[in-house]
Image (cartoon, helix red, strand yellow):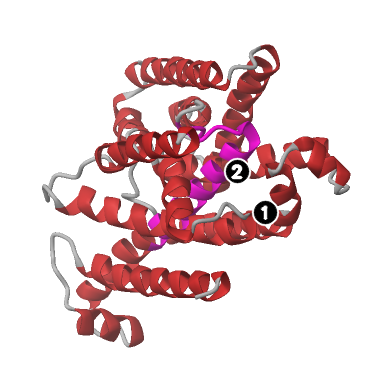
């Protein structure tokens, strides 16, 4: 089987799996709903109570998990290309924590004045936080050539931002603490249709631009000298990689809080399955893989100990942490083999 057919088969399987998970997760919860009732409710909502559960609560959450999970995985893929480091990701490099800090400051500041922050306002605040964190990482990258040490610095930046966020939450009003605490742990709970629409627009426009520069990214993967010989503007490409990865991770953090390991693990998993690192294949594949894994983790988070809901980062860390360790060890064995 040639590569094109194999890629087509894998993409087809992933799309079918994603569709099946979509139907299953919409039906799962404190009140289990049969598949035929889901379809009936979507086509012709007669039962008001059932329709409210599906359309107002579960559908926005499931769609958000698909879109934002895919965005986070794609952001991780772009950062791994930018830094040339297999464990680079928005959570590890402190980008998600920086976004979380600025959003927390803005939320507390506005809510204490009785002002409600809009969905777009949260995205902008998260984007600013992402760029600030990325800026610190970039300053360190110019001074430190050892990528392993750079990742450690990113982790430290993440811890500092998280510590400041905890101080912000600790001294916030009681009514604000509940909102901030749930959001800061990472969760798709409470996402409304307005949030879904904004996130879908931002994510898919960014993905479209990312896919458009997939050929220059592919040349960049083969080395800066090769990319320059191919006519790639390295400086502009690096700026676009930072910009697109920051927009994607900021959108996720704004609506779902910081989510760990998706951005690191999914690109590794998809490379292992597809046996390629070509951006034109990996960008859509990483998005689909991130959507599938995030949807599974979110379903476990809200149903494993229902009615108590776990943070999604707890599930992603437990499920994907060992996968990342295994894949990195395997990659090292292959490279030294």
Question: What secondary structure predominates along the stretch shown in magenta?
Answer: helix
**Closest to the observer: 119 or 295?**
295
Alpha carbons under labels 2 and 1: distance apart: 9 Å
Going by the image, does 138 lie left or right of 37? right
The quadrant of the image that shows the C terminus is top left
Crowdedness near tag 1: few (<14), some (14–19) or many (≥20) residues, C-alpha within 10 Å = many
Going by the image, does 218 lie left or right of 15? right
Label of residue 78 in the image = 2
Query: Can you say whether 173 is above or below 221 in the image?
Result: above
Mark 2 near mark 1, Cβ–Cβ under 8 Å?
yes
**Residue at (33%, 17%) from the top-left corner?**
170
**Residue at (35%, 61%) from the top-left corner?**
62
Whole-percent x, y for residue 211 in the image: 67, 58
**Residue at (28%, 56%) from the top-left corner?**
296
Mark 1: which secondary structure? helix
Mark 2: which secondary structure? helix
Whole-percent x, y for residue 80 in the image: 56, 38
**Residue at (63%, 54%) from the top-left corner?**
279
Whole-percent x, y for residue 110 in the image: 50, 30
Query: Which residue is tagged 1?
Result: 210
- Among the 4 quarters of the image, the one containing residue 245: top right
Query: Can you say whether 34 is above or below 44 in the image?
Result: above
Q: Is residue 127 magenta?
A: no
Query: Can you say whether 257 is above or below 46 in the image?
Result: above
Q: Is residue 53 visible?
A: no
Q: Residue furthest top?
A: 143
Q: Which residues are magenta?
A: 63-91
Q: Earlier in the sequence, mark 2 or mark 1?
A: 2
**Closest to the observer: 160 or 17?**
17
């Amino acid at each position: 089987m040639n590569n094109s057919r194999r890629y087509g088969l894998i993409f087809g399987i992933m799309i079918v799996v994603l569709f099946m998970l979509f139907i299953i997760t919409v039906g799962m919860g404190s009140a289990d709903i049969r598949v035929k009732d889901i379809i009936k409710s979507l086509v012709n909502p007669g039962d008001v109570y059932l329709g409210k559960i599906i359309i107002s609560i579960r559908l926005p959450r499931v769609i958000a998990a698909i879109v934002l999970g895919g965005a986070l995985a794609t952001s991780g893929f772009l950062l791994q290309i930018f830094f040339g480091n297999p464990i680079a990701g928005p959570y590890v490099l402190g980008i998600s924590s920086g976004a979380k800090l600025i959003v927390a400051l803005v939320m507390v500041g506005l809510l204490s004045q009785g002002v409600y922050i809009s969905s777009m306002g949260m995205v902008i605040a998260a984007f600013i936080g992402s760029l600030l964190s990325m800026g610190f990482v970039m300053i360190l990258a110019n001074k430190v050539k050892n990528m392993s040490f750079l990742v450690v610095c990113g982790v430290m930046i993440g811890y500092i931002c998280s510590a400041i966020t905890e101080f912000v939450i600790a001294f916030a009003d009681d009514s604000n603490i509940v909102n901030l605490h749930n959001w800061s742990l990472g969760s798709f709970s409470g996402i409304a249709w307005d949030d879904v629409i904004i996130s879908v627009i931002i994510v898919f426009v960014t993905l479209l631009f990312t896919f458009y520069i997939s050929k220059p990214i592919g040349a960049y993967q083969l080395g800066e000298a090769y990319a320059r010989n191919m006519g790639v503007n390295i400086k502009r490409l690096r700026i676009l990689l930072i910009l697109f990865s920051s927009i994607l991770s900021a959108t996720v953090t704004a609506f779902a809080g910081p989510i760990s390991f998706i951005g690191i693990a999914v690109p590794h998993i998809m490379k292992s399955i597809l046996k390629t690192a070509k951006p034109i294949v990996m960008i859509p594949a990483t998005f689909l893989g991130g959507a599938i894994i995030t949807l599974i983790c979110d379903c476990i988070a809200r149903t494993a100990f229902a009615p108590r809901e776990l943070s999604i980062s707890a599930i992603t860390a437990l499920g994907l942490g060992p996968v990342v360790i295994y894949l990195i060890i395997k990659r090292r064995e292959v490279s030294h083999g």
